[in-house]
Image (cartoon, grey):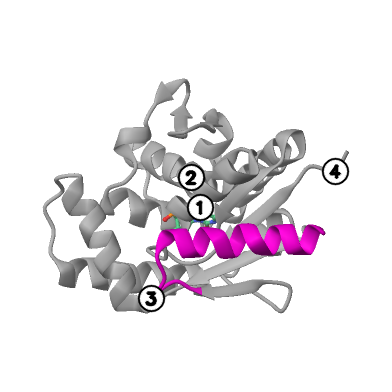
Amino acid sequence: MERLIVAIDGPSGVGKSTASRLVASELRIPHIDTGAMYRAIGLAAVRAGISTRDEKGVENLASQVHIEFIPGERGRILLDGEDITPLIRTQEISMAASDVSAIPGVRRILVRLQQEMGRRDGGVLEGRDIGTKVFPETRYKFFLMARPEVRAQRRYRELLAKGQATDLETVLQDTVKRDEQDSTRADSPLSYDHSYTVIDTSDLSIDEVVSRIVGAVRAIGA
Ligand code: DC
């Protein structure tokens, strides 16, 4: 039987992760955070002292390390068997992930991994290119967006909650820079087309976002 694949794409700070996790739990399928995989490669490069813009070096590294994402109530990401989940949500690793995600060889490896996972068990996959590249054939595609200042505020609160010292202005600048980089890279830039349902989450609660997505999945599937 065809596995259910729900694609949730969009820039950072639109509430993608929380919404995707809740949608997956309502639909009883795994939540697959593809950004965590790019973050793992970013962390591996930083640790190895390889520039995140060194295409050959990072591609080589990506082909040697073992990345595993384990879905669950709290999804976990493993790098060569080590649980690195608590280490990947810093501003430094966000930028490193964005850098390495522009490298075609890295995308090839991770997209294959994501397709294998989705084909095996289905899932709600969140990322930037799920509906355009990873599972373009799915009928369930959502693109979340929000005003930049709303997104920076959300990220800022997340970082503060984790005890990471920062200020709103820096977060806003980093958010805009990372989106610009993710949207203008040559390979699989952040984008959407008419096959997506677009949701502006600026003035919506998480529950409203979740019920719109779940409602649309059920309506499309009916
Ligand atoms: O969703 P996130 O912020 O954890 O993603 C980190 C970076 O990884 C993001 O800046 C772009 C990249 N990414 C990507 O290129 N494709 C995906 N499917 C997911 C993330």
Tags 3 and 1 in contact by the CB under 8 Å rule? no
Task: Give the class, few, some or many, for how many residues have Cα within 10 Å of label 2's Cα (few <14, many ≥20).
Answer: many
Please name the residue shown 65% across and 72% down the image. Answer: 197
Badge 3 residue CB within 8 Å of ligand 1: no
- List the residue tagged with mark 3: 203
Q: Which residues are magenta?
A: 200-222
Cα separation between marks 2 and 4:
35 Å
Please name the residue shown 65% across and 61% down the image. Answer: 215
- List the residue tagged with mark 1: 55
Tags 2 and 4 in contact by the CB under 8 Å rule? no
Tags 1 and 2 in contact by the CB under 8 Å rule? yes
Cα separation between marks 3 and 1:
39 Å
Please name the residue shown 52% across and 68% down the image. Answer: 144
- Residue 58's disc is 2
Q: Main secondary structure of the magenta part?
A: helix
Which one is earlier in the sequence, the residue at label 3 or at label 1? Answer: 1
Which one is earlier in the sequence, the residue at label 4 or at label 3? Answer: 4
Badge 2 residue CB within 8 Å of ligand 1: no
- List the residue tagged with mark 4: 2
> Mark 1 belongs to which amino acid?
Glu
Cα separation between marks 1 and 4:
36 Å
Indicate left or right for 16 with 110 as reference: left
- The label nearer to you, 4 versus 3, is 3
Cα separation between marks 1 and 2:
5 Å
Look at the picture and state if 2 lies above or below 13.
above
